[in-house]
Amino acid sequence: STPASAPASPTLPIYSVETDEKVVAVTFDAAWNADDIDNIIGTLDKYGCKATFFAVGDWLVKYPDAVKKLSGAGHEIANHSDTHAHLNTLSTEKLITEMEECDKKILDLTGVKNVLCRAPYGEYNDNVITTCYQSGRYPIQWDIDSLDWKNLTTEEMIKRIVPKLKNGSIILLHNGTENTAGALPSILEAIKNEGYSF
């Protein structure tokens, strides 16, 4: 595949997007369960928010119906590695296998060829980033971390997200946590109240 166009510093992932528009990207890492997917889809639909779900290969295999529901509702399914490995410990060959195996599962379930990847644990090194770009994938991080996996309250998540918002921000959430699905309406409402769209 053709290389993705790398930024000026090709050994860094994309933390946010350069834009003059008041838009932000809502992203979820999907690795645990799928109990809250219907709830999350309903909330995202209500707020007109199309999100990106970075899914681990194992999760795609375990919850194919959730993947199809997300994709059918217009959300993007992207690569979070096949086995949630520590990518910065792998050889280039194993890295490519981790990405290709996950992408195959995404394509099989959604019919869409993925071009995004997010390293598990937010860990990366020069080899991970270079391999992403050279294999035609964009390495995506985030500039706003909700820390929702620590079971924060709705108010705590909003305090972590809203003050840091800027044009092109990428927000990290997780499905399968204790409070995220329940907090999501208030989070999206707070973002909209700051004048951002999704």
Image (cartoon, helix red, strand yellow):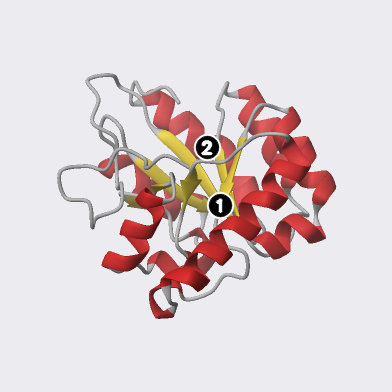
- Taking the view exactly as shown, the residue that stands out farthest to the left is 8
Q: What residue type is labelled 2?
A: Ser
Residue at image location 51% in from the left, 72% down from the top: 94
Q: Is residue 34 above or below residue 164?
A: below
Out of 109 and 97, give the one closest to the viewer: 97
Which numbered circle lies on residue 186?
2
Of mark 1 and mark 2, the one earlier in the sequence is 1
Residue at image location 30% in from the left, 38% down from the top: 5
Q: Which amino acid does label 1 sit on?
A: Asn
Q: Looking at the image, do the residues carrying marks 1 and 2 touch, with CB atoms under 8 Å apart? A: no
Q: Can residue 38 be seen in this view?
A: no
Binning the other alpha carbons within 10 Å of mark 1 as few (below 14), some (14 to 19) or many (20 upward) gives many
- Taking the view exactly as shown, the residue that stands out farthest to the bottom is 89
Q: In this view, does 38 lie to the left or right of 124?
A: right
As measured in the structure, the alpha-carbon distance from the residue carrying label 1 to the one carrying label 2 is 27 Å
Mark 1: secondary structure? strand
Q: Is residue 21 above or below residue 51?
A: above
Binning the other alpha carbons within 10 Å of mark 2 as few (below 14), some (14 to 19) or many (20 upward) gives some
Out of 144 and 15, give the one closest to the viewer: 15
Residue annotated with mark 1: 79
Q: Is residue 124 visible?
A: yes
Q: In this view, does 118 lie to the left or right of 101?
A: left
Q: Is residue 73 left or right of residue 85?
A: right
Give x and y (percent) for residue 191: 41, 31
Residue at image location 36% in from the left, 24% down from the top: 196
Give x and y (percent) for residue 156: 42, 55
Q: Is residue 139 left or right of residue 5?
A: right
